[in-house]
Image (cartoon, rainbow, N blue to C red):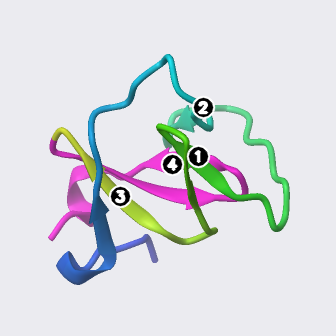
Amino acid sequence: MGFVLMSSQKTIVAARDENLPNSPVSNEEDDTVTVDEGAKCLWNGQEFADGDAICADGEYFVCSYGSWMKLPAEALP
């Protein structure tokens, strides 16, 4: 069973600013995933906990072990 995002579970954020601290973004097609248990994710310098979801420019991401996972369209509300 995949991840399904409920509309109340996300934080709206500004577009990714590469001049600010950001965690890496991966997607389902990535062959390798780095797992760092307890690691936080950063988006434009703002810290998010494991499992937190955000929306930036109409794209949805969830924090997973220190990396952002881009959510596929079927996970969106």
At label 4, the amino acid type is Met
Residue drawn where x is 55% and y is 41% of the image? 45
Q: Which residue is mark 3?
A: 54
Up-down: is 35 above or below 9? above
For this orientation, the residue located farthest to the top is 19
Which residue bears the numbered disc 2? 21
The residue singled out by tag 4 in the image is 69
Numbered marks: total: 4
The magenta span reads: 58-77
Q: Would you identify the image quadrant in which residue 33 lies? A: top right
Residue 42 or residue 25, whichever sits in front: 42
Circle 2: residue type: Pro
Q: Is residue 49 left or right of residue 16?
A: right
- How packed mark 4 is, by other alpha carbons closer than 10 Å (few <14, some 14-19, many 20 or more), is many
Kindly report which numbered mark, 3 or 4, lies closer to the viewer in this rendering.
3
Q: Nearer the viewer, mark 3 or mark 2?
A: 2
| Callout 1: SS | strand
Q: Which residue is mark 1?
A: 42
**Residue 16, numbered circle:** none
At a point 37% along the width and 30% down the height, the residue shown is 16
Q: CA distance from mark 4 to mark 1?
A: 12 Å
